[in-house]
Image: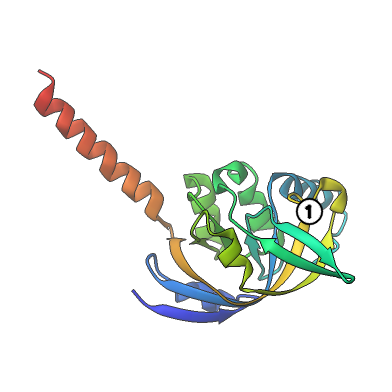
Amino acid sequence: MSEFKLKTPLSEGDVDKLEVGDIVYLSGEIYTARDRAHKRAIELYESGEELPFDWNGAVIFHCGPVVIERNGNWEVVSAGPTTSSRMNDLEPKVIEYFGVRGIIGKGGMNGGTTEAMNKHKCVYFSITGGAGVLVAQAVKRVKGVYWEDLGMPEAVWVFSVEDLGPLVVTISKGRNYYLEVEKKVLSVKENLLKRWIK
């Protein structure tokens, strides 16, 4: 296990050096996006329209933040992760279409997304759930917001972050720690059932 401090946008080289289990602290810009933002981005791309922001090399945070406006500036009160499985059907296209290099969330993602990440040089970072106020402390500034019509949690927020982490690399280079653990648990369950149910 290694520890890295990385700056966004991420390059292929950044992604290449990350292994499952590594710890990462991110600085730079990250973008929040949940289901509705993913859907809109895909629809725009497939209709030949451009996005109002550039996700090439970007890190997307599965997050519905709580944001307030004070003295004309946005302030992030809480930025806890959204369960990433909600985006499983959408994420492969987002990764392929836009060149996204990193996803931050909780709970992991499925095999289809793992394949897309491996093919297009992207990694998944797990962040602790239930600690949104602590995560918000790494957000130094809100640089912008897009698609406010989707509502606060579904809009795309652009955060300037400093040492956001610790983030744990849990999907990288075709390995998916969540699926590996699930396989082990099912194997243990099967063996227990064989021993106790005759």
Residue farthest to the top, as pictured = 198
Q: Quadrant of residue 66?
A: bottom right
> At 73% across and 50% down in the image, what residue appears?
153
Answer with left or right where residue 190 lies relative to residue 54. Answer: left
Q: Quadrant of residue 95?
A: bottom right
> Residue 61's spot in the image, x, y percent?
63, 60
Q: Amino acid at mark 1?
A: Ala
The residue where tag 1 is placed is 155
The image quarter containing residue 169 is bottom left
- Residue at (84% x, 59% y) in the render: 146
Residue occupying image coordinates x 79% and y 61%: 68
Q: Residues within 10 Å of mark 1 (few under 14, many from 20)?
A: many
> Could you tell me if residue 113 is visible in this image?
yes
Q: Point out residue 99 in the picture as x, y percentages from the top left corner.
A: 67, 64
Position above or below: 47 against 60 = above
SS assignment at label 1: loop
| Nearer to the camera, 189 or 39 | 189
